[in-house]
Image: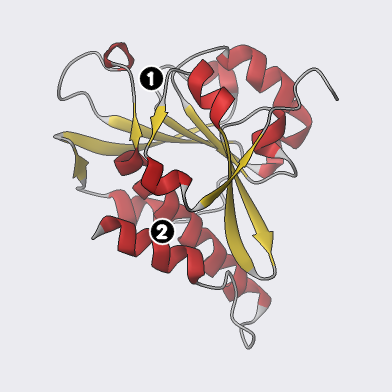
Amino acid sequence: MVIVAILALLSMPAAGSSAVPQSAVAQEYDLKAAFLFNFARFVEWPTDAFAAATTPIIIGVLGDDPFGPSLDVLVGGETIRNRPLLIRRYRSVEQIEACHILFISSSEASRLDHIAKALGRRSILTVGETKDFAARIGIVGFELAQRRLRLRINLAAATDARLTISSQLLRQAQIVRSSRGHD
């Protein structure tokens, strides 16, 4: 059932043809919020990524928060694998302690290399929307192509972070190779 929801999300346009720019942006970020929520269903973390069996799954937003209330509304009261979901917002990478899914806002584009170094090989699913995010520093990149939201996933980066991504999610994404060290 969840994969059906993901497939429906992938096929939805990021913005309607008659939408005004503000509502198109809101619709895009509502869709991205839904993906962040669903990533928790399709990713497995190593056991040492959690202090206890009921430790929450933390979804973090680093930098400017483009989601407004939609991410909080979507995640509020939800649990996955007996773990509650919580949202945290961070102004700098140094504030991040426990985090499992980290959306790195486009406001952080000039600091991506610093962020990658600060996070090291922590077991955090990094998600971003800047150009070539998955190939450059992250694991999952959102890309708008032909008015549709596409996923780009870097499996090598996921392996480095000791994360396992479900084949159900991988089938919906373009797999990219890391360009690290080739910039």
Instruction: Specify the quadrant that holds the N terminus.
Output: bottom left
Mark identifier at residue 70:
2
Q: Residues within 10 Å of mark 2 (few under 14, many from 20)?
A: some
Residue 40 drawn at (x, y percent): 33, 40
Among numbered discs 2 and 1, the one appearing first in the sequence: 2
Residue at image mark 1: 98
Vertical comparison of 24 with 173: above or below: below
Q: Residues within 10 Å of mark 1 (few under 14, many from 20)?
A: some
Residue 153 drawn at (x, y percent): 57, 39
How many discs mark residues in the rendered view?
2
65, 120: nearer the viewer? 120
Color encoding of the figure: secondary structure
Q: Residue at x 33, y 16 (%)?
A: 49
106, 149: nearer the viewer? 149
Q: Residue at x 86, y 25 (%)?
A: 183
Amino acid on which disc 1 is placed: Ala
Residue contact between numbered discs 2 and 1, judged by CB atoms under 8 Å: no
Amino acid on which disc 2 is placed: Ser
Residue 176 drawn at (x, y percent): 65, 38
Question: Which element is circle 2 on?
Answer: helix
